[in-house]
């Protein structure tokens, strides 16, 4: 499995595209905590950032794997239900040759929650 980074926006204030919450802990913080509580496989690391500027699509995470891999940005996530699914998507991503997970092999989360795929930076 290729090195994979799950980057989570810890300032997202929406759960699965719902109404923005008005009190902390924000859904993004809860997603970061839920992902940190998961048993991350070897080669998968977690990184927190403040704001992906995808506020209407929160909670948001990105899956990346270096300069030769595509990056997936996933949104409309629920920290109470989707943390383990994000980890499973990260494993499928890491198992791919270039970050593009075949549609027929992609976990449901990749098929239904991908906001965009960003090409490698070469």
Image (cartoon, rainbow, N blue to C red):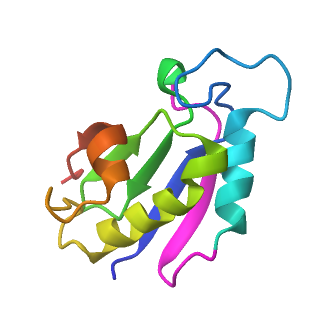
**Which quarter of the picture shows residue 39?**
bottom right
Left of 67 or right of it: where is 86? right
If the image is split into quadrants, where does the N terminus sit?
Answer: bottom left
**Which quarter of the picture shows residue 50?**
top right
* Residue 104 drawn at (x, y percent): 14, 61
**Which quarter of the picture shows residue 95?**
bottom left
Residue displayed at 15% across by 56% down: 103
Q: Is residue 54 above or below residue 63?
A: above
Left of 48 or right of it: where is 16? left
* Residue 75 drawn at (x, y percent): 45, 36
Residue 101 among magenta residues = no
Residue displayed at 32% across by 53% down: 108
Between 63 and 17, the one lying in front of the other is 17
Between 69 and 22, the one lying in front of the other is 22
Residue 47 among magenta residues = yes
Q: Which residues are magenta?
A: 39-53
Between 65 and 18, the one lying in front of the other is 18
Query: Which secondary structure dominates the residues rendered in magenta?
Result: loop
**How many marks on residues?**
0
Q: Is residue 35 above or below residue 60?
A: below
């Amino acid at each position: 499995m290729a090195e994979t980074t799950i980057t989570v926006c810890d300032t997202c204030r929406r759960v699965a595209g719902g109404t923005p919450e008005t009190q902390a802990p924000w859904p993004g913080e809860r997603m970061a905590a839920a992902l940190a509580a998961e048993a991350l496989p070897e080669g998968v690391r977690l990184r927190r950032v403040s704001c992906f500027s995808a506020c209407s699509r929160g909670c948001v995470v990105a899956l990346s794997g270096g300069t030769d891999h595509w990056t997936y940005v996933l949104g409309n996530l629920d920290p109470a239900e989707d943390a383990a699914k994000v980890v499973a998507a990260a494993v499928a991503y890491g198992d791919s040759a270039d970050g593009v997970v075949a549609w027929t092999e992609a976990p449901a989360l990749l098929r239904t929650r991908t906001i965009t795929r960003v090409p490698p930076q070469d």
